[in-house]
Amino acid sequence: MSAGAFNFLEKPFRTQELCDNIQKAVTLDTERWRNHQQQEDALKRIEKLTPAERAVLGQVVAGKTNKMISEELDVSVRAVEDRRARMMKRLEVGSRAELLEVASAAGLR
């Protein structure tokens, strides 16, 4: 198990039990691969951001409003709005929910 085995079967085993375990392993591996691909995609998208946009992203992920972000980063609310708009465009998202999905896929919390 420590070497990466999905499961083990005791002998004698039924053929159906073997097939079921193989199917579960394939499904699990497919899901892991999909998650890995989503993470890589999200990280590549986040790499496009400027440091200022990344700072805003971190604050948005933390649930802060534009006003709170402006106070935290010591910039105007308008600057936060501009950075946030550029960030949304570079990340290719249209809503805060999509933004949070990208951040979550990248491992930001």
Image (spheres, rainbow, N blue to C red):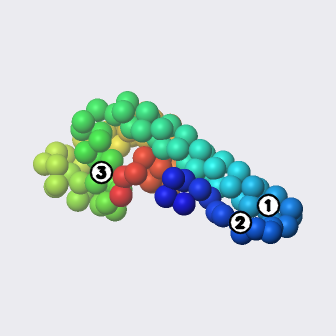
Q: In this view, does 36 lie to the left or right of 46?
A: right
Q: Is mark 3 on a helix, strand or loop?
A: helix
The residue depicted at 59 percent of the width and 44 percent of the height is: 33
Residue 55 at what x, y percent from top left?
25, 45
**Residue indicated by mark 1:** 18
The residue depicted at 68 percent of the width and 55 percent of the height is: 25
Question: How far apart in space, not on screen, are marks 2 and 1 (Cα)?
Answer: 8 Å
Is residue 44 visible in the rendered image? The answer is yes
Q: Which residue lies furthest to the right in this view?
A: 15
Q: Which residue lies furthest to the left in this view?
A: 74
Q: Which of 83 and 45 is in front in this view?
A: 45
Q: How crowded is the residue under tag 3: few (<14 C-alpha within 10 Å), some, or many (20+)?
A: some
**Residue indicated by mark 3:** 58
Q: Label for residue 9?
A: 2
Q: Which of marks 1 and 3 is nearer the N terminus?
A: 1
| Residue contact between numbered discs 2 and 1, judged by CB atoms under 8 Å | yes
Q: Earlier in the sequence, mark 3 or mark 2?
A: 2
Q: How crowded is the residue under tag 1: few (<14 C-alpha within 10 Å), some, or many (20+)?
A: few
Q: Inspect the image, locate mark 1, and give the three-letter code of the amino acid beneath it.
A: Leu
Q: How crowded is the residue under tag 2: few (<14 C-alpha within 10 Å), some, or many (20+)?
A: few
Question: How far apart in space, not on screen, are marks 1 and 3 (Cα)?
Answer: 46 Å
Q: Nearer the viewer, residue 7 or 108?
A: 7
Q: Which residue lies furthest to the front in this view?
A: 11
Question: How far apart in space, not on screen, are marks 3 and 2 (Cα)?
Answer: 46 Å
| Residue contact between numbered discs 1 and 3, judged by CB atoms under 8 Å | no
